[in-house]
Amino acid sequence: MTIGELAGRFGLPTHVLRHWESIGLLAPERHDGGHRRYGPEDLGRVAMILMGKEAGLGLRALSQVLSTPDPMDHAELLKEHIAVLERRIAQAQAAKDLIEHALDCPLPFAECPHAREQIASRIPADPGTAPG
């Protein structure tokens, strides 16, 4: 299939596929006149790239993970990414909890002890004052 057909299949602009090719994520065959031709294996490759992006991997990390036939060859990189995802999940959960509390609290936000505590915890200490 052509670059337009592959891009259309995934709802992507063709420049995205060209960019992925330029950084080594895709390597289409070239036919008459240098035109790109994509086969069934490229469908799987694009699907894996999109899955990796959905998992929060950047293109550089994806390039590493997909550089070998088995992504599990890069277990350390994937484990590091799990730690990043766990931090993001914790931050998202804390944000959700704060918003839910704000919605449930009968007091105005500025008077809510929980909100005031959260606000105070985000204010950096004055570097000119000694702790204590």
Image: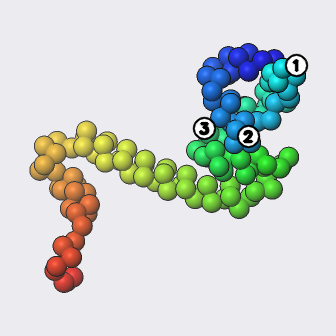
Q: Nearer the viewer, mark 1 or mark 3?
A: 1
Upstream in sequence: badge 3 or badge 2: 2
- Callout 3 amino acid: Glu
- Dot in front, 3 or 2: 2
Residue 25: assigned label = 2
Quadrant containing the N terminus in the rendered view: top right
Up-down relation of residue 46 to residue 99 (above or below): above
Q: Position of residue 29 (x, y in %)?
A: 86, 29
Tag 1's secondary structure?
Answer: helix
Instruction: Tell me whether circle 3 and circle 2 mark residues in contact (CB < 8 Å).
Output: no
Q: Nearer the viewer, mark 1 or mark 2?
A: 1
- Horizontal side of residue 11 vs 111, given as left or right: right
Disc 3 to disc 2, how far (Cα)?
16 Å
**In terms of secondary structure, where does tag 3 sit?**
helix
Could you tell which of marks 1 and 3 lies nearer the N-terminus?
A: 1
Q: Secondary structure at mark 2?
A: loop
Q: Is residue 50 visible?
A: no
* Marker disc for residue 32: 1
Question: Which of the numbered marks, if any, corresponds to residue 109?
Answer: none
Callout 2 amino acid: Leu
- Residue ID at (78%, 18%): 2
Front residue of 61/83: it is 61
Quadrant of res 123: bottom left
Asked if 122 appears above or below 67 in the picture, the reply is below
* Residue picked out by circle 3: 54
User: Which of the two residues, 121 or 11, is positioned nearer the viewer here?
Assistant: 11
Taking the spot 68% from the left edge, 30% from the top edge, the residue there is 18
Quadrant position of residue 46: top right
Q: Earlier in the sequence, mark 1 or mark 2?
A: 2
Residue drawn at point x = 69 percent, y = 42 percent: 23
Q: Residue at x 73, y 40 (%)?
A: 25
